[in-house]
């Protein structure tokens, strides 16, 4: 239950962030995604303007992936598989799960996989 509440809180935070990102990309008058503003006089300004929505999209994409990892962790909790390393089968350290609640490997195995 402790880790489930941590995951649900993180999930709530991400959903709020995604909602904020979606709102920032929407044109409040039309309700459609905002397009590039072609009234700028220089290409540099247009390039900067084009980069902002792209950064927002990439951030939203990253948050969406994190949300999927949290959903997977909730499924593992329901199945009774949460907190067990998928590599060695040992219990994942409590400190690791508190820092990375969607972790699938213990720290030792994760370090070995990263090499």
Image (tube, rainbow, N blue to C red):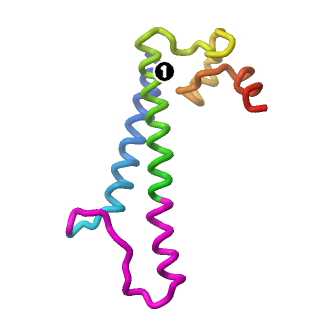
Q: Residues within 10 Å of mark 1 (few under 14, many from 20)?
A: some
User: Which quarter of the picture shows residue 95?
Assistant: top right
Q: Is residue 69 left or right of residue 21?
A: right
- How many numbered tags mark residues here? 1
Q: Nearer the viewer, residue 77 or 95?
A: 77
Instruction: Tell me the quarter of the image containing the N terminus.
Output: top left
Q: Which residue shows up at 46% across the image and 27% down it? A: 6
User: Which quarter of the picture shows residue 110?
Assistant: top right
Q: Residue furthest bottom?
A: 41
Instruction: Tell me the quarter of the image containing the C terminus.
Output: top right
Q: Which residue shows up at 63% across the image and 24% down it? A: 96
Q: Which residue shows up at 44% across the image and 42% down it? A: 64
* Residue 8: x %, y % from top left: 40, 28
Q: Which residue shows up at 59% across the image and 12% down it? A: 84
From the image, tell me which residue sits under label 1. 3
Q: Is residue 18 left or right of residue 108?
A: left
Which residues are drawn in magenta? 30-55
Q: Is 35 in the magenta?
A: yes
């Amino acid at each position: 239950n402790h880790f489930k509440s941590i995951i649900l809180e993180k999930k709530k935070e991400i959903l709020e962030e995604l909602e904020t990102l979606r709102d920032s990309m929407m044109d409040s008058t039309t309700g459609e995604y905002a397009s590039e503003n072609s009234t700028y006089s220089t290409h540099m300004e247009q390039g900067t303007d084009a980069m902002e929505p792209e950064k927002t999209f990439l951030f939203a994409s990253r948050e969406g992936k994190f949300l999927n990892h949290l959903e997977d962790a909730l499924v593992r909790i329901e199945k009774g598989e949460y907190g067990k390393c998928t590599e060695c089968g040992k219990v994942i350290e409590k400190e690791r799960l508190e820092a990375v609640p969607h972790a699938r490997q213990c720290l030792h195995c994760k370090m070995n996989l990263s090499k």
